[in-house]
Amino acid sequence: MEVRVVHRRALLESLAEELPPGTIRFSSKLTSITRQKPTDASSGALIGCDGVHSAVARWLGLSTPIDSGRGAVRGLSVYPDGHGFSSGSQQFLGKNERTGFFPMNDKEIYWFITRRSNPKCHRDDGKGLPPAFRDVVNHSELSTVSWAPLKFRLPWDVVVGPTHRGSVAVAGDAMHPMTPDLGQGGCAALEDAVVLGRNIAATLHIDGSVDAEKVERCLDDFVRERRWRAAGLIAGAYVSGRIQQGGSGWWESAVKFIRDGAFYRYMFPRIVSSVVGYDCGPLPITLVPA
């Protein structure tokens, strides 16, 4: 499984460059939703991509994402003269924790720590961490370091829950928040964008206007195509993180036996295969009058 790490800002800028200026309004927050009466003609659609605490998801009636029982610290390290690591990732497994880092280029490294959401786990001085990892953390810029609880939506809530209603739907983390153990949160959102774009393209007239009668159907098709894929990613990420996280006492021995004897040998390759072997299909190019 090949891992590519990119700056979120660079990704957003690359995507935004494809749009007319002023299309995206940043630093804005959705506070409420008022739907027009059915008798009011409207060809608009609202796609909630407002994250794990989505206001659109609440309006639709989707269940609130639940706490996985783990938290993550993440940061970016900078080596002005170069870090000297190879391009591959490194991962370290400990009691109730998993750490790792990914070189982004020859001077920057992304790193993470996932641990049980236990206050005692966050008050140590990192003595149990490998020297190489501690050196990476010591090169961090404080402004890049963050901590957050790891939340996810139950897979069956994505499959059978109200992920869309009429001309309102959700996508990305608003639809399928997941733990980061497979590194597929952002990738799944990009898949959503391709599938959604393909379905919306089917509602366009030759003059660029939208066929209002097809909007609801296109969102229904989008959700139908994405919900099982998203549910599988959520489940795969949770299982992967829970087993690799380890434990303590007798549970540590049991998890290690399952992880080393069965998970890495049989389960993880299948999970990875389902992730990298998936094809969300093409994004058609629709030309409309300027």
Image (cartoon, grey):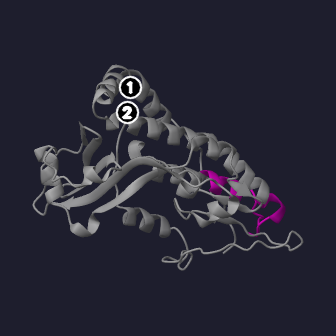
Q: In which quarter of the image is the N terminus?
A: top left
Amino acid type, callout 1: Phe
**Residue at point 54% right, 71% down?**
19
How many residues crowd around disc 2 within 10 Å: few (fewer than 14), some, or many (20 or more)?
Answer: some
- Residue 146, quarter of the rendered image: bottom left
Residue 244, percent across and down?
34, 35
- Residue 166, quarter of the rendered image: bottom right
How many residues crowd around disc 1 within 10 Å: few (fewer than 14), some, or many (20 or more)?
Answer: many
How far apart in space, not on screen, are marks 1 and 2 (Cα)? 8 Å
**Residue at point 33% right, 29% down?**
251
Q: Which of 66 and 191 is in front in this view?
A: 66
- Residue 55, quarter of the rendered image: bottom right
Query: Quick check: 31 left or right of 183?
Result: right
Query: Quick check: 285 left or right of 66?
Result: right
Residue 154's label in the rendered image is: none
Q: Quadrant of the C terminus?
A: bottom right
Q: Residue furthest toward the top?
A: 261
Q: Which of 171 and 15 is in front in this view?
A: 171
Amino acid type, callout 2: Ile
Task: Give the residue at mark 1.
Answer: 263
Q: Residue furthest toward the right?
A: 39
Q: Which of 208 and 55 is in front in this view?
A: 55
Residue 133, percent across and down?
17, 48
> Mark 2 and mark 1 in contact (Cβ < 8 Å)?
yes
Residue 100 lies in the magenta-colored region: no
**Residue at point 39% right, 43% down?**
181
Residue 243's label in the rendered image is: 2
Instruction: Report the magenta residues as a range.
Output: 195-215
Residue 208 lies in the magenta-colored region: yes
Residue 278, percent across and down?
53, 37
- In this rendering, the answer to whether 35 lies above or below 104 is below
